[in-house]
Image (spheres, rainbow, N blue to C red):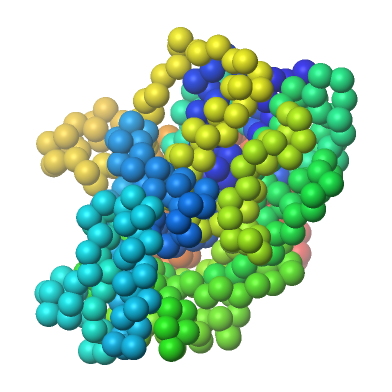
Amino acid sequence: MVDIVIIGAGVSGCAIAREVSRCKADVLVLEREEDVCCGTSKANSAIVHAGYDAANGSLMAKLNVEGSRLMPALSKELDFPYENNGSLVVMVSEDDRPALNKLYENGVANGVEGLRIVERDELVRMEPNISDQAVAALYAPTGAIVCPFGLTFALAENAAHNGVRFQFDTEVTGVEKIDGGWKLSTSRGDVEARVVVNAAGVYADKLHNMVSDDPMTITPRRGDYFLLDHSAQGHVSHTIFQLPGKFGKGVLVAPTVHGNIIVGPTAIDIEDKEGVATTQAGLDEVRAKCGLAVKDVPLRQTITSFAGLRAHEARHEFFIGEAAPGFVDCAGIESPGLSSAPAIGVMVSGIVRDILKLEENPAFDPKRKGILDPKGLDDQAHAALIKENPAYGTVICRCETVTEGEIIDAIHRVPGARSVDGVKRRVRAGMGRCQGGFCSPRVMEILARELGVDQSAITKAGAGSELIVGVNKDAI
């Protein structure tokens, strides 16, 4: 029997795994997809929210502020991209002044540091491309941006380094109470655990309802986005939100840590928990609204559009605690879930520690070194690296200048890349202007070689997404 099973390898599950690895325990993470960061955590705004929005006194507000405070030090400890660029909530009508003041007061009550309201003259100096209709904005200097993939992989790798095991392609289909713990029925056999942590994202309600008489319903809330090319870099420097007002709730325009601009999302409730296809209506809504706070958004520089799902519960709150003895919910983790993840990890780990009376792991190592990016080296160091390992001199992805050495490193990490998308999310091969049109075949070759499999076994994103479906000679 395993001490702890964590269901879900998104950012919350991986944060919990990393924090629990500070203790002496046998920990297993079960994930229905082929890699970590395959659900909500892979498709979001990549924002570290300051914490002024969630209702004062809510768990959501508490963990948002705590998570935001933990993120800068965590980024140094685990070596993932993070940038404290600050955020602005822009109002475009003087009629909305009371709402802006209320947001400021809520943020102060939540404990957000440095909040202030900036008027138009200062706002234009901060953001020259701010809308001509912008009147004032709430400025949050603690707002930031992060790489959601980088954060999640860093947490997972450090957890694995400290003894946590990951099992992929494993869907939990049933939960049954047994003596001393729980039996989980999965697509790959039964697993028994003393404690179960439910961090299953949009499916967390399904698991919760298997063990609790207090039903929960999670509605997938789809958000459509545009991602703009590096050529749009500099159009904005802060994360710019629109204050909900007489024009409805707007969309954000923000830089990314990788030099792109992200625009979105919509907020459309759907029934399909796998419904991540963009729609014409959704993208049209983003186009229509993005100019309310920022003028001349260069949407013609779009290199891709995508949609993600948020695990929305009608009470708009995080649900963290025992749904049944030894079954711990981490459910309803929608925005600001990414921002809150470090604090969620600490809180859930504390609950599990108390249940199992776990001892501290004296061998715990909090450090993780990220994948080396040669672009960050000076010419002399870069030349020395290539001399030592020529793979770092072979560029595979031209758009993002990703080398073979980086891809090999990504594959041999634990947990490492096993698919084209796994490589893409770790080192950005295929994230650029051509969206993998040039580099995907070479990435497939490297994956097959390093994993010791035939190229026909390589997938885009796990079983059912094989890229090679036949051989030309066989069809002639």
Expressed as whole percent of the image width and height from the top left, the position of residue 411 reads: 50, 37
Residue sitting nearer the eye, 403 or 46: 46
In the displayed structure image, the side of residue 375 where residue 446 appears, left or right:
right
Q: Quadrant of residue 382?
A: top left
* Screen quadrant of the C terminus: bottom right
**Residue at the (36%, 70%) spot, across then down:** 102
**Residue at the (55%, 28%) spot, across then down:** 350
Instruction: Give the total number of marks visible in the rendering.
Output: 0
Q: Is residue 1 above or below residue 324?
A: above
Q: Is residue 302 above or below residue 160?
A: below
Residue 131 visible to the viewer: no
**Residue at the (65%, 72%) spot, across then down:** 269
Q: Quadrant of residue 385?
A: top left
* Screen quadrant of the N terminus: top right
**Residue at the (18%, 77%) spot, across then down:** 119
Q: Is residue 433 above or below residue 294?
A: above
Expressed as whole percent of the image width and height from the top left, the position of residue 294 reads: 29, 81
Residue 20 visible to the viewer: yes
